Image (spheres, rainbow, N blue to C red):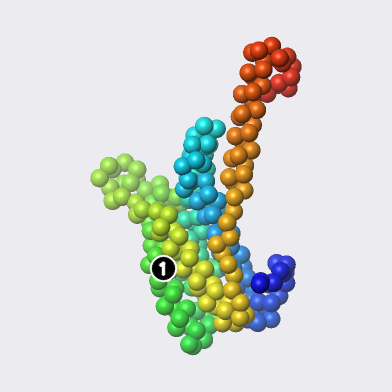
Amino acid sequence: MGRHQTAEEVKQEYIEKLGDEFGNFFDRIRNEVIFLHFKWSEFEELYSKEDRIELMNKISPNFYFYLQNLLLDDVILGITRLTEPKSDRKGNARLTLWSFSNFTTPPLKGEVSKLLKRIKKEASFSYDRRNRKIAHFDKDLALNEHAKPLKIASREKINKVIDSIAELMNLIQGHYVKSETYYRVGSQTGYHLLLTADDGVRFQELKFKFYKEGKLDISDFDGHQ
């Protein structure tokens, strides 16, 4: 059974086992990976099930279409942030998974390097979408119907790369801390919000029904018509 620890207690354990610099670094990256998984869980709960999609189309199709694109783009940006090189062309340092190679030693270093190469390959689709659609408005893609299409960002590809990222994190955590983090914790707050919105729509429909039947006065609508 897993232990219950506060965020600060977890961070201090990493610092104790990995040292100040590596411990702080690992804790910060781990939080990013957890947040990435939560966002992706919300996306899958909303957009991978037909009954949810039907509800969204009933309540506010445009809003949930925007939300779908925003969530997907944010997850893709999260993948690129974690998997890009550890410094830019000007030498400015970045906080990425590749920085793990600065801290690990053989034989773990070899395992980490092998897994990082796999992650880089799995994440390649995300860079194409970031560079030509999310961060930049690629002219050829926007105006030329025969332009090279964007690499597909399927749920299968995203699940594969974020699972590999979790595998890397647990490889390091298991080696130094003798524990693992379960990153696939589901999040249904978006779905619960959708159900609440559906209740609101039903309530409004019922109010109008009673109004038409003369059972309610217009003042009972409190200005929300």
Front residue (pair 207, 109): 207
Q: Say what secondary structure mark 1 lies in.
A: helix
Residue 69 drawn above or below residue 123: above
Q: Position of residue 8 (x, y in %)?
A: 72, 69
In the picture, measured across the screen, residue 128 lies left or right of residue 61, that is left
Q: What residue appears at the point 41 percent right and 57 percent down from the top-left corner?
A: 156
Q: What residue appears at the point 71 percent right and 75 percent down from the top-left corner?
A: 12
Residue 47 drawn above or below residue 131: above
User: How many other residues sit within 10 Å of disc 1, few (<14), some (14-19) or many (≥20)?
Assistant: some
Would you say residue 17 is visible in this rendering?
Answer: yes
Front residue (pair 1, 185): 1
Q: Which residue is mark 1?
A: 120
Q: What residue appears at the point 45 percent right and 50 percent down from the top-left corner?
A: 134
Would you say residue 91 is visible in this rendering?
Answer: no
Mark 1 belongs to which amino acid?
Lys
Q: Position of residue 7 (x, y in %)?
A: 70, 67
Q: What residue appears at the point 42 percent right and 78 percent down from the top-left corner?
A: 114
Q: Position of residue 198 (x, y in %)?
A: 60, 34
Quarter of the image where the C terminus is located: top right
